[in-house]
Image (spheres, rainbow, N blue to C red):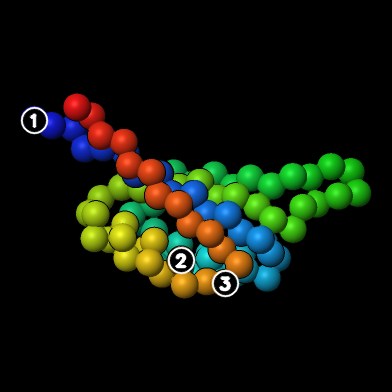
Amino acid sequence: MKKPGHVIIGIHVLDRIRKAPDIQKIMSRHGCAIKTRLGLHETAEGFCDPAGLILLEMAGDRKAIDAFVKEVSTLQGVDVKKMTFSHG
């Protein structure tokens, strides 16, 4: 039996503070397709970068994953990339 591949979605958010609620709503609607979530942004004492990166490991049906990518891609100030790795 062939193992399913891995689908990784990268979401670059230019204005985290304003866009985070919209992105969170979309992720909640598609939560069953998200296996792992990691959020990254630069921060230091007295500094918090307004831009950020969200990395998602997706699971399940490819149609559900594509629907998620399509919906997130409609947001202004958000860049979405999809990587697919197969096993063999």
Q: At label 3, which amino acid type do we have?
A: Gln
Q: Most extreme residue toward the right, as rendered?
A: 46
Taking the spot 36% from the left edge, 48% from the top edge, the residue there is 58
Which mark's residue is nearer the viewer, 3 or 1? 3
Mark 3–mark 1 Cα distance, whole angstroms, equals 41 Å
Which of the two discs, 1 and 2, sits closer to the camera? 2
Between marks 1 and 2, how big is the CA–CA gap? 33 Å
Circle 1 packing at 10 Å, graded few (<14), some (14-19), many (20+), is few
Image coordinates for residue 81, horizontal then vertical, percent: 45, 52
| Mark 1 or 2, nearer chain start | 1
In terms of secondary structure, where does tag 2 sit?
helix
Q: Quadrant of the N terminus?
A: top left
Give the amino acid at mark 2: Val
Instruction: Give the residue at mark 2.
Output: 72
Residue at position x 80%, y 52% from top?
A: 48
Tag 1 or tag 3, which sits nearer the N-term?
Answer: 1
Decide if residue 5 is on the left or right side of residue 31. left
Does residue 35 show up? Answer: no
User: Which residue is under mark 1?
Assistant: 1
Residue located beneath label 3 in the image? 76
The picture quadrant where one finds residue 78 is bottom right
Q: Is residue 60 left or right of residue 32?
A: left
